[in-house]
Image: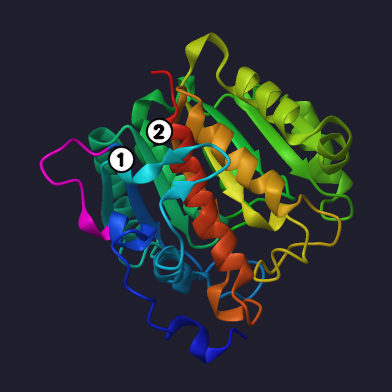
């Protein structure tokens, strides 16, 4: 459980050290939003017990500990017009909750150049992507960074990819990056292959690197200029850096890989939305490392957007 004092420390005020939390809270003013942030706090259908509904608020708090300046990329995301569109109320409620999530995602993505959705567990991906694309879903592409295939039957955090395929998403435009060993059944792996989903395993990322794997994934999902949705399920990461993800395993992607993937997603003009899911803020390490990683993924996505050529 996270240390109770971790979120209560008052940051030092320094006008020369602008905080990402203040940037997001300030809103876009009279400008059209570049980046919209929406909380989709799903958790009740999770296969593993989770407090992921607490995560959107925890990520916003963590942004208050981070600056808007990315030293390695030489970009200050404070120049982007950011809009916090709030949290969807009870998104797990069947029909009504999913409808609210879809409408919020549709509205936010229509107003902003890029949407970042904060889960919640991975069940947030289905209504968010469906809301962003609507009838255009059949022409869209999906890249997941995930330890799991997420094509289980039913309605849970293990089924969003199946739900999207059932809604018309073309499996030939679905790419799954970071699929873990010992985390999926042969039956579901065989189904993913039979459907034509492109799978880039954890071992592939280790041998080829995240840049090459993300490039390939975005090319397949965005072939022909198709719009793309990126699902960044942080249980794709090594459990040492993501202990707050109930299903993370040893040997997963590094924190650096996750941050680079978030940047590459934000940088690609075909990407319309990114979600960050599966973090349980109520069961993080005492230092809050998983929530901080999620918050940094928000900023890396924003940095990619700030550096887009179009």
Residue 125 or residue 145, whichever sits in front: 145
267 vs 232: above or below: above
- Residue 110 belongs to the span the image colors magenta: no
One can see residue 137 in this view: yes
Q: Magenta stretch: give its range.
A: 25-33
Left or right: 280 in relation to 194 = left
Nearest to the observer: residue 35 or residue 11: 11
Residue 174, by quadrant, is top right
Residue at point 77% right, 65% down?
239
Give me the C-alpha separation between circle 1 and circle 2.
Answer: 8 Å
Look at mark 1 in the image and give the residue it sits on. 79
Instruction: Specify the label residue 2 is tagged with.
Output: none
Q: Position of residue 250 (x, y in %)?
A: 85, 62
Instruction: Determine whether, in the image, residue 196 is placed left or right of residue 36.
Output: right
The residue that label 2 is drawn on is: 306
Horizontal arrangement in the rendering, residue 265 relative to residue 256 (left or right) = left
Dot 2 crowding, Cα within 10 Å, few <14, some 14–19, many 20+: many
Where does the C terminus fall, quadrant-wise?
Answer: top left
Question: Dividing the picture into quarters, in which one does residue 305 lie?
Answer: top left
Whole-percent x, y for residue 198 in the image: 74, 27
Q: Is residue 26 magenta?
A: yes
Q: Residue furthest bottom?
A: 4
* Residue nearer the viewer, 203 or 226: 203
Up the image or down, 20 lies above or below 299; here it is below
- Total tally of numbered discs in the picture: 2
Labels 1 & 2 near each other (Cβ < 8 A)? yes
Name the N-terminal-most of marks 1 and 2. Answer: 1
């Amino acid at each position: 459980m996270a240390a109770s004092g971790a979120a209560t420390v008052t940051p030092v005020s320094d006008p020369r050290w602008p905080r990402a939390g203040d940037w997001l809270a300030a809103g876009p003013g009279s400008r059209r939003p570049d980046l919209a942030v929406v909380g989709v706090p799903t958790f009740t259908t999770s296969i593993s017990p989770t407090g992921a509904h607490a995560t959107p608020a925890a990520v916003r708090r963590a942004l208050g500990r981070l600056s808007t300046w990315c030293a390695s990329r030489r970009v200050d995301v404070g120049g982007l017009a950011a809009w916090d569109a709030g949290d969807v109320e009870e998104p797990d409620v069947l029909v009504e909750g999913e409808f609210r999530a879809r409408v919020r995602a549709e509205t936010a993505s229509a107003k902003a150049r890029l949407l970042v959705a904060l889960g919640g567990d991975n069940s947030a991906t289905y209504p968010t992507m469906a809301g962003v694309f609507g009838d255009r879903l059949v022409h869209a592409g999906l890249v997941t960074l995930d330890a799991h295939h997420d094509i289980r039957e039913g309605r849970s955090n293990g089924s969003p990819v199946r739900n999207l395929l059932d809604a018309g998403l073309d499996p030939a435009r679905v790419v799954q990056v970071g699929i873990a060993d010992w985390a999926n059944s042969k039956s579901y792996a065989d189904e993913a292959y039979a459907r034509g989903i492109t799978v880039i395993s954890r071992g592939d990322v280790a041998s080829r690197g995240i840049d090459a794997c993300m490039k390939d994934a975005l090319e397949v999902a965005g072939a022909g200029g198709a719009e793309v949705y990126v699902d960044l399920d942080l249980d794709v990461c090594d459990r040492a850096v993501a202990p707050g993800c109930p299903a993370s395993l040893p040997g997963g992607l590094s924190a650096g890989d996750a941050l680079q993937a978030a940047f590459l997603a934000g940088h690609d003009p075909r990407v319309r939305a990114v979600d960050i899911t599966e973090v349980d803020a109520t069961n993080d390490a005492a230092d809050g490392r998983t929530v901080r990683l999620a918050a940094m993924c928000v900023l890396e996505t924003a940095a990619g957007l700030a550096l887009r050529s179009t």
